[in-house]
Amino acid sequence: MIKKLLIANRGEIAVRIIRACKELKIDTVAVYSEPDVNALHAQLATESYCIGGAASADSYLNIANILSVAALTGCDAVHPGCGFLSENAGFAAMVEKCGMKFIGPNPQVMEKMGDKAAACTTVKNAGIPVIPGSDGAIELGSAGALAEKIGYPVLIKAASGGGGRGIRIVRSTNELEIRWAEAQAEAKKFFSDDRMYIEKYIERPRHVEVQVMCDKFGHAVHLFERNCSVQRRNQKMLEEAPCFGLSAKLKNALYEAAVKVCRSVGYDNVGTVEFLLDQNDDFYFIEMNTRVQVEHCVTEEITGMDIIKTMIRLADGGKLPYKQSDISCNGHAIECRINAEDIRNNFRPTAGKINFLHCPGGNGIRIDTDLYTGGEVSPFYDSMILKMIAHAPTRLDAIRKMRCALEELLIEGVDTTVESQYMILHHPDFIRGDYDTGFVDEFLENNGTNIR
């Protein structure tokens, strides 16, 4: 039984994990970088230790330092959160070699599904449609010929990527080399892996993902779907569950495909299977995230399940405590990611001291954050600083509730994206549920000129 767990992460997800562990009566060990000495996760954990400087490579990606702290403090397990080392199969394997449990799927499955290109090949062999592209990582020298074969535009994607990092759209041969260099540099920075692959770019798709849970005994269930199509620069801004406007037949096909992916690879923890839906409602597998997602909160709200607790119990050898028929979808949930960014300066990241913070509350409102009055927003890491989730019986009720919550949210000291989220929630296309991954760019171009 897990009694002490190290969180190899920071920010709101580290705080979320600590709170789940407290409910499970598990002691926690936080690790932090030098700039994060006063961070909330470092204050809430049972124990906290500095593991390096500001650069991620010196701290939150420093496997040796993280595992040294875990071993020296007598941890039974390590939870990687999301981002950083969360999809690093080598890290998961090293955790296990050190005699601790990795809170996630087994390293072999992580390696198979964490390599985005290899995952597509595996899924294709299982009979699930995938987007045409390279069968695995590819070198720049071969990318041009393949791009010509499948037809521009194409996507360059990081083989070990996630979270929208290491991705570039290429619309012609002339752009290929420079976009390749950009994506490769970003992949190296965020994942320490600059292998790339390419796939056909589908114009204006919807991005829909299915939350799955599996145990080590072959049981697998889905927790319905989320619409993650509100994106800017491949970064999700807002998510909702369930996905409005999909037929029951299409939803069931997505669920069946997601569970089939899990069973085909022997998946054994929480994960997310992501799909693109084209304008004909044909769907294509794009990747599997072998970790908890930032947007897991909306699924928790519509199902009433605690995904973080389930991750820990499954990694501890437990069985899924419910069958598919036990899981129901109740109401509608929307999550707004609030970033420390200046929306009038091309969403440039901002940093500084939080002079005042007031978070809304009330029935159906949830806040996940590591912010507090007097705390600091660091310039060294991801700009997301708060997640606000609204849950209501209907989608329109959830939209209204989220608007009210955004009106009440006060964050003084740094610029934030609250205003742009508020404007999105009033846009007619969003209200109708008639939007795709191109919605935000079009919105900013045609409707958001006053905030640029």
Image: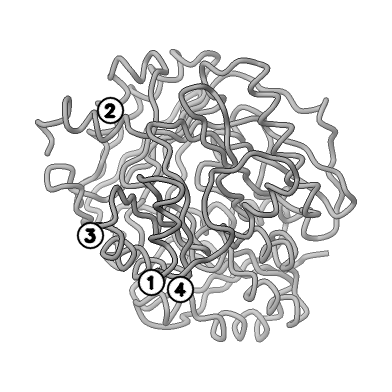
Question: Disc 2 designates what residue?
Answer: 422
Q: Position of residue 446 (x, y in %)?
A: 16, 26
Q: Residue at x 72, y 68 (%)?
A: 107
First along the sequence among labels 2 and 1: 1
First along the sequence among labels 1 and 3: 1
Q: Nearer the viewer, residue 68 or 185?
A: 185
Amino acid carrying label 3: it is: Ala
Question: Disc 1 designates what residue?
Answer: 189
Question: Disc 4 designates what residue?
Answer: 32
Q: Crowdedness of circle 3 by 10 Å Cα count: few (<14), some, many (20+)?
A: some
Dots 3 and 4: beta carbons under 8 Å? no
Amino acid carrying label 2: it is: Tyr
Q: Crowdedness of circle 1 by 10 Å Cα count: few (<14), some, many (20+)?
A: some
Amino acid carrying label 1: it is: Lys
Dots 2 and 1: beta carbons under 8 Å? no
Q: Position of residue 429 (x, y in %)?
A: 33, 17
Question: Disc 3 designates what residue?
Answer: 351
Quarter placement of the N terminus: bottom right
Q: CA distance from mark 1 to mark 3?
A: 20 Å
Q: CA distance from mark 2 to mark 3?
A: 21 Å
